[in-house]
Image (cartoon, grey):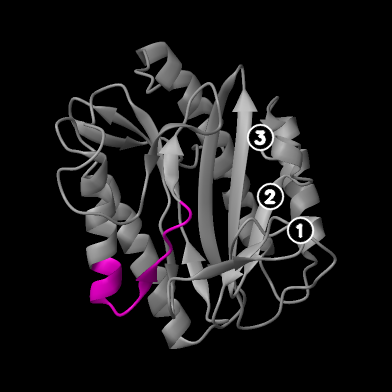
Amino acid sequence: MVHIRTDREISLIAASCQIVADTLNMLSDHINPGVRIIDLDKMAEEFILSRDARPAFKGYMGFPSTLCVSVDDEVVHGIPSDRYLEEGQIVGIDCGAEKEGYYGDHAITFSVGNVSESRKKLMQTTKDCLMKGIAEAKPGNFVSDIGYAIQTHAEGNGYSVVRELVGHGIGSSLHEEPQIPNYGTPNQGYKLCEGMCIAIEPMINMGNKEVITDSDGWTIRTSDGEVSAHFEHTIAITSDGPKILSKVSQNG
């Protein structure tokens, strides 16, 4: 079922989204070589709790942590561990929060120290893919218009789009209908309308599109060992077009 949200509900979703945006903004000062990934997770959990919210990922289908932290060839769902970040890595951090029964979801891929130009380009292209996808999220368009915009830009820059993982509706549950693939042909799937809230999250690979799942049952990585980048925003579809909800607050 696809939910059409009231203005009040969108405000509540936006409040949770702002918390996750503020969390990632706080963490950005700590993404440095020599930092333990588990310490980032602890910082995020404490920050979310301090905002009278709950980490949305922790315990979700058994996931053990507040953050998904995915380094280099890890695409998504990396479990925070005692590993240390290293110079030149890229690290995708996905964060969710729930407050007053409504959810926010947001992801950024960060540079660890100085990274290669090829990695910088992958990150920028993935970020651009997200914004191009968001631009298509307006009343009267279709779900596949979002994916088509993302796929066209990614493949036009020589990258590949992960197929097995998709964006999603969001609101009173973390994952709701409809699914939002990052690929497709125009004018297909669910028709977008005012009041929908969705999370758009391109996962773009340097090499081929195939992925594998680690033995932990969570961590998904590229099959060829090439790096991957991931950016995500939660948006509301309004009569004026898409509105990004996962933005840093003025006091965040």
Percent across and percent down for residue 231 are 46, 56
Q: Residue at x 60, y 39 (%)?
A: 96
Q: Closer to the camera, 60 or 213?
A: 213
* Magenta residues, start to end: 153-165
In the displayed structure, 165 sits above or below 55; it is below
How far apart are labels 2 and 3 at the CA level?
Answer: 9 Å
Q: Which mark is residue 67?
A: 2
Q: Closer to the camera, 180 or 51?
A: 180
Amino acid type for the residue under numbered disc 2: Leu
Which element carries disc 2, helix, strand or loop?
strand
Which element carries disc 1, helix, strand or loop?
loop
Q: Residue at x 48, y 53 (%)?
A: 165
Q: Closer to the camera, 173 or 233?
A: 173
Query: Can you identify the residue that label 3 sits on?
Result: 56
Q: Which mark is residue 80?
A: 1
Image quadrant where one finds the N terminus:
top left
Percent across and percent down for residue 248 are 49, 42
Percent across and percent down for residue 211 are 53, 68
Q: Residues within 10 Å of mark 3 (few under 14, many from 20)?
A: many
